[in-house]
Image (spheres, rainbow, N blue to C red):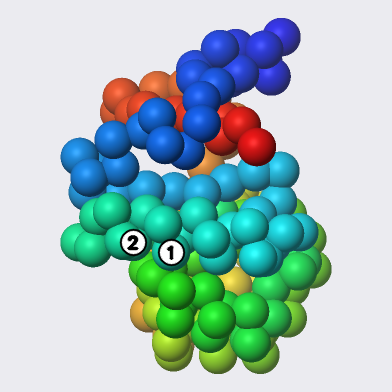
Amino acid sequence: MEDQKMQETFTSCYFRDVDWAKYDEVSLTGGEPLLDVPRTARIIGAIRTLNPYCKIWLYTNGTKLQIETARFLKMVGLSGITVSLHTRLDPVILAAVATMMSLRFLANKKEFTGWEIFCDQYEVPYRIWKMDDCYDMEPEDRFILKR
């Protein structure tokens, strides 16, 4: 039921049907966007071309995050990465990413335990969340991009 409620907030469309220029911030999520880095890079590059001033964020669970990938995505226009702390992550990779672009964490209280020192050292903002938070966010447009 929760998944269906979330799915109903998305509009299915083609990339070309979205007026990307009107957004101050765009977040790419998935599935997992790092499973298809070339496609993700094309989307980031296209958004950046259409809107050179918006912040483009990538939401990931971090399992496929590599320093080279982050560097490449920054080069094509990515502003920052939001990592959900649901899996074991490499703090060395996260530290490298934090020095090259904005990095944010989303976690529940249990998952965040132990990351406070890292966040302080690298000035990484974080948000402790619960699933109910997903439904009372400020209004936003949500799209599922057709291939």
Furthest residue in direction front, as rendered: 16
**Residue 30 position by quadrant:** top right
Tell me residue 85's x, y (percent): 66, 59
Q: Is residue 7 above or below residue 26?
A: above
Residue at 64% over, 87% down: 68
Residue neighbourhood size for the residue with mark 1, other residues' Cα within 10 Å, grouped as few (<14), some (14–19), many (≥20): many
* The disc label shown at residue 48, or none: 2
Query: Could you tell me which residue is drawn at 45 percent across and 29 percent down?
Result: 142
User: For residue 45, which quarter of the picture?
Assistant: bottom left
Q: Secondary structure at mark 2?
A: helix
25 sits left or right of 56 in the view:
left
Left or right: 15, with 92 as reference point: left
Whole-percent x and y of residue 91? Answer: 66, 83
Q: Residue at x 76, y 59 (%)?
A: 35
Tag 2 and tag 1, C-beta contact below 8 Å: yes
At mark 1, the secondary structure is helix
Q: Nearer the viewer, residue 9 or 77?
A: 77
